Amino acid sequence: MGDIKFLANLNQTSAEAVPRLSDVLGGERRLSFGSLAEYAGNVEAVEACLRFVRGCEPALALVGPSGWGKTHLLEVVTSLFERTQGVKTEVLSPQMLVSAAHRLDPTAPLILDNAHEIFERVRYKNEIRVILERRVRAGRPTLLAFTSHTVSRAMKGLLPNLDDWRITPIHQPNVGERKAVFSRLAEVADLEIFPDLAEIIGSYLVGNCCTIVGAVTRLRAEESSFAGPAGALRACGVLNPFFSDTPAWDLSRLILNRARKFEPLPDVRWLDLALFAMLHVAKLPEVEVAQASGLEPNVVYLRSLDFRKRFLASPELQTYVDAFCHDVVMRLKRGTTETLPSTGITGPGSS
């Protein structure tokens, strides 16, 4: 019944203001280890940062690709230092460190992000290495984050007394782990999703964690619940622009093809079912729906509107549409790509 209720309110719009990213990530929860999306590739780094805050890892270097949580981890660390130890610190860049070195408290934790920028300027490298050497010798808490896929010889050369450092990698997640990241971010954002949507996101969405955060933010700005197959299809429509770099993704064509093959219902034309699903469930742009179906925009609008009137008055049709949405979502989940013949759809007469 949840999906039917969702479908029956498709044209209602929320009066809530579009939230900012900080709101989506949950305010204060954003600066806690509880807000992190853990997966096999970052668990070691999360544990190392926790040990760093506790004083068990005084010299720590994180190494990982861009966009997979290094900066977030550093922000969590600075927040925990302040909440648990009353120590105020901030995340610095190499340039900020060099510029403010004489004003910084040498006993306070040093948190340095984008440490790879040190190699771009020789002066930074020499000055910062001296700072690091003094801190390591004195046992002062020091945390660096490098953006790189591997630990390089240059990184090791920058770290004085290398044996005193713990170098911890962060790896890019696989498809299953990307699913877990999306699910966790959705949970933090109080976003209700159909479980299979997370698998679709993990399989099709190209990019890093920042891209996934962007997808969660876009969904949360639209509404707070995408439960059930209809909700999942609605989410796919909202995120359709996010999949533009994925060759296997063609939502409108897939909906058309599944409608043509779906179990028929008396007095229901498959093309009308597809138009309704594209325009009123996935809420794809009318121009895109017209182009995919080979119809004029006004024809698309009128046929889908007529179907919607019948849909709202018929519980049987609502159940039928719900089953169709489930069919499309399951096809996406399985990763099967389907396209219409190159000739497309010839027009209303073909339905």
Image: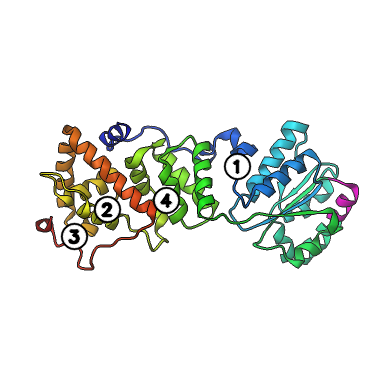
User: Does residue 230 appear to the left or right of 271 in the view shown?
Assistant: right
- Crowd rating for badge 1 (residues with CA inside 10 Å; few <14, some 14–19, many 20+): many
Amino acid beneath label 3:
Gly
Query: What is the number of the mark on residue 36?
Result: 1
Q: Give the quarter of the figure containing the C terminus.
A: bottom left
Q: Which residues are magenta?
A: 131-140
Give the mark nearest the N terminus, 4 or 2. 4
Of badges 2 and 3, nearer the viewer stands 2
Disc 2 versus disc 3: distance between alpha carbons? 14 Å
Query: What is the number of the mark on residue 58?
Result: none
Q: Give the quarter of the figure containing the N terminus.
A: top left
Q: Picture coordinates of residue 332 (x, y %)?
A: 36, 53
What residue occupies the far front of the structure in this picture?
263
Magenta stretch: dominant secondary structure: helix
- Crowd rating for badge 3 (residues with CA inside 10 Å; few <14, some 14–19, many 20+): some
What residue sits right under mark 3 in the picture? 294
User: Does residue 243 appear to the left or right of 299 in the view shown?
Assistant: right
Disc 1 versus disc 3: distance between alpha carbons? 45 Å
What residue sits right under mark 4 in the picture? 200
Give the mark nearest the N terminus, 4 or 3. 4
Q: Picture coordinates of residue 46 (x, y %)?
A: 68, 45
Residue at position x 38%, y 37% from top?
Answer: 227
What residue sits right under mark 2 in the picture? 255
Nearer to the camera, 312 or 200: 200
